[in-house]
Image (cartoon, rainbow, N blue to C red):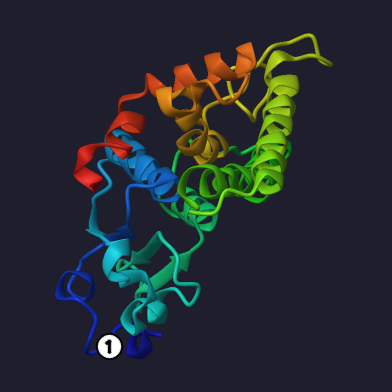
């Protein structure tokens, strides 16, 4: 793997990085991994470095990057502590890798297999059923030059449906026990399932989005609760711009 991971065109700050290195951009998918790295640093002193990719210059589509991540998306995680260095693509897979490899006390995971299964369910739910809808809504409603009413309505409706799913779970509608976090017994425990969701969900509290979605009350409390974590704020901070 080491012979093909880096090439002559690989930037020096990438090929010469030590330890954990994240190639990222300060967008929701990048931020979820940035947040976990900040949490690991705060808890364990885990060190990492970053390279900020520029979409405008197409860094993520260049051959040197496709060696690391054939999908040409951000973020990409490289663990130079492994021999040979190990690369991980897909943000949720990166959360899983970091938790399994560096969260030795399972602070962001679970030892109980049923609680862990619950965390995986919500991590995959957000990755596969929620983030794509919100991302597509943003594309068609905010960035596309051609405004297609059907596409805008479809992805807005699906985003609202997903928010309703989260409200059912967080409110304890069928358990009579409201939750603070997505996974874990009782009110739950902050985990990678929450990190994976919050980097996207926080956008819905922004003034640019707030009037476009009817946020249910338990979802609002959930977003604001995680926003109080210092590592969450650092993980979306200007350091990653």
Which quarter of the figure has residue 217?
A: top right
Q: Name the one closer to the observer, 34 or 111.
A: 34
Q: Could you tell me how many numbered marks the image carries?
A: 1
Q: Position of residue 62 (x, y in %)?
A: 34, 79
Is residue 210 shown left or right of residue 17? right
As displayed, is residue 91 above or below residue 44? below
Q: Position of residue 79 (x, y in %)?
A: 35, 65
As displayed, is residue 85 above or below residue 175? below
Q: Position of residue 232 (x, y in %)?
A: 36, 31
Question: On the rendered image, what quadrant is the N terminus found in?
Answer: bottom left
Is residue 115 shown left or right of residue 75? right
Q: Residues within 10 Å of mark 1 (few under 14, many from 20)?
A: some
Residue found at the far right of this picture: 174
Q: Name the one closer to the observer, 40 or 209.
A: 209
Identified at 15% across, 75% down, the residue is 12
Identified at 28% across, 47% down, the residue is 46
Q: Name the one closer to the observer, 78 or 68.
A: 68
| Secondary element at tag 1 | loop
Q: Using the rendered image of the protein, determine whether residue 178 is visible from the camera's viewpoint.
A: yes
Q: Using the rendered image of the protein, determine whether residue 103 is visible from the camera's viewpoint.
A: no
Is residue 151 shown left or right of residue 192? right
Q: Position of residue 146 (x, y in %)?
A: 54, 54
Identified at 54% across, 42% down, the residue is 141
Q: Name the one closer to the observer, 107 or 177.
A: 177
Is residue 212 shown left or right of residue 26? right
Identified at 40% across, 72% down, the residue is 86
Residue found at the far front of this picture: 146
Give the residue at mark 1: 7
Which quarter of the figure has residue 24?
A: bottom left
As displayed, is residue 116 above or below residue 53? above
């Amino acid at each position: 793997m080491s012979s093909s991971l880096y090439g002559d065109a690989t930037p020096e700050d990438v090929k010469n990085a030590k330890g954990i290195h994240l190639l990222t951009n300060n967008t929701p998918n990048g931020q979820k991994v940035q947040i976990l790295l900040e949490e690991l640093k705060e808890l364990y002193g885990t060190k990492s470095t970053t390279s900020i990719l520029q979409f405008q210059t197409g860094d993520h589509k260049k051959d040197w990057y496709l060696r690391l991540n054939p999908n040409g998306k951000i973020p990409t995680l490289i663990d130079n502590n492994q021999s040979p260095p190990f690369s991980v693509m897909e943000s949720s897979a990166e959360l899983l890798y970091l938790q399994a490899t560096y969260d030795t006390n399972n602070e962001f995971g679970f030892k109980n297999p049923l609680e862990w299964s619950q965390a995986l369910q919500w991590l995959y739910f957000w990755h596969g059923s929620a983030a794509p809808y919100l991302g597509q809504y943003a594309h068609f409603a905010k960035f596309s030059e051609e405004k297609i009413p059907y596409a805008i309505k479809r992805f807005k409706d699906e985003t609202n449906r997903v928010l309703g799913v989260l409200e059912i779970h967080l409110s304890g509608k069928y358990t009579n026990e409201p939750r603070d976090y997505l996974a874990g017994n009782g009110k739950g425990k902050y985990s990678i399932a929450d990190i994976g969701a919050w980097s996207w969900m926080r956008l819905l509290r922004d003034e640019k989005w707030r009037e476009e979605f009817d946020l249910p009350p338990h979802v609002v409390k959930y977003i604001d609760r995680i926003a109080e974590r210092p590592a969450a704020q650092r993980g979306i901070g200007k350091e990653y711009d």
